[in-house]
Image (spheres, rainbow, N blue to C red):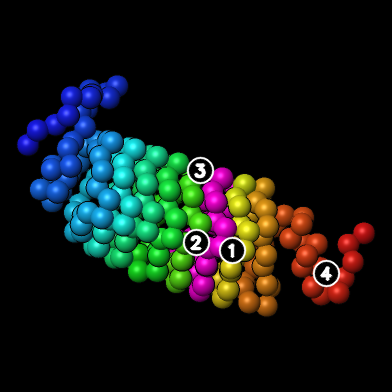
Amino acid sequence: MTRSRNPDRFGRVSRTADDLHAGDSFEDEIFAGLDLAGADLGEKELVRCTFRNMKLSESRWRRARLEDCRFESCDLGRFDPAEMMLREVGFTGCKLMGVDWTELGQFPVMTFTDCNLRYGSFVGLVARKIPFVRCALAEATFLKADLAEARFEDCDLASARFEACDLRGADFAGSHDLVLDPAANRLQGAKIPLETAIALAASFGLKVI
């Protein structure tokens, strides 16, 4: 298999699209600048791999296993992560619009930083302490999700829906347009923005002075 001739600062050379299609497992590899929109990448095992500036929209990752991997500035719009196992996987500056995370593999450990997650569906997700940092989550749906101690830092939550979620100890510091129904979610110990607290008080007929 050939590799492209663009070594990174550690001397690693980027793999090609053919490499990724042909192989079943990879360790310590870089995949950069490739167009794999709609590709079937299911059942692959990737450890300590980096995906950079990739087109991966509508790609399919069923039963793939990723550990200690990074996605940087990738387009993953509407990709399919059904039964995908994620352990210490980070998404930075990625487009993840319209992704359905409902059938994601159990107990994922992942981080989202500066990502576009608009219209995402997080139904039944169990991801305690998951961090969303400076992410767009407008019109996302969180239903029956266990997000205890999750961190939503400086996020856009306009029209995001939270219902039947465990949000105990969650931190929404700096986020805006957050609407929460305490009758429909577990919110003990959650930290919410002042604007949300005022809206909640108003819903109970209280006045903040």
Sequence-wise, the earlier of marks 4 and 2 is 2
The residue type indicated by label 2 comes to: Tyr
Taking depth in this image into account, of 95 and 88 the one nearest to the observer is: 95
Q: CA distance from mark 1 to mark 4?
A: 20 Å
Q: Is residue 83 left or right of residue 41?
A: right
Q: CA distance from mark 3 to mark 1?
A: 17 Å
Sequence-wise, the earlier of marks 1 and 2 is 2
Residue found farthest to the bottom: 183
Q: Is residue 34 left or right of residue 200?
A: left
Q: Is residue 37 visible?
A: yes
Q: Which mark is residue 119?
A: 2
Q: Which mark is residue 114?
A: 3
Q: Which mark is residue 160?
A: 1
Q: Nearer the viewer, mark 1 or mark 2?
A: 2
Residues at marks 3 and 4 touching, judged by CB atoms closer than 8 Å: no
The residue type indicated by label 1 comes to: Ala
Sequence-wise, the earlier of marks 2 and 3 is 3
Indicate the secondary structure of the residue bearing disc 1: loop
Residues at marks 1 and 4 touching, judged by CB atoms closer than 8 Å: no
Q: Nearer the viewer, mark 4 or mark 2?
A: 2
Sequence-wise, the earlier of marks 3 and 4 is 3
The x, y position of residue 184, in whole percent, is 63, 77
Q: CA distance from mark 2 to mark 3?
A: 16 Å
The residue type indicated by label 3 comes to: Asp
> How many circles with numbers are drawn on the protein?
4
Residue found farthest to the right: 209
The residue type indicated by label 4 comes to: Ala
Residues at marks 3 and 1 touching, judged by CB atoms closer than 8 Å: no
Q: Residue at x 34, y 38 (%)?
A: 53
Residues at marks 4 and 2 touching, judged by CB atoms closer than 8 Å: no
The x, y position of residue 49, in whole percent, is 26, 41
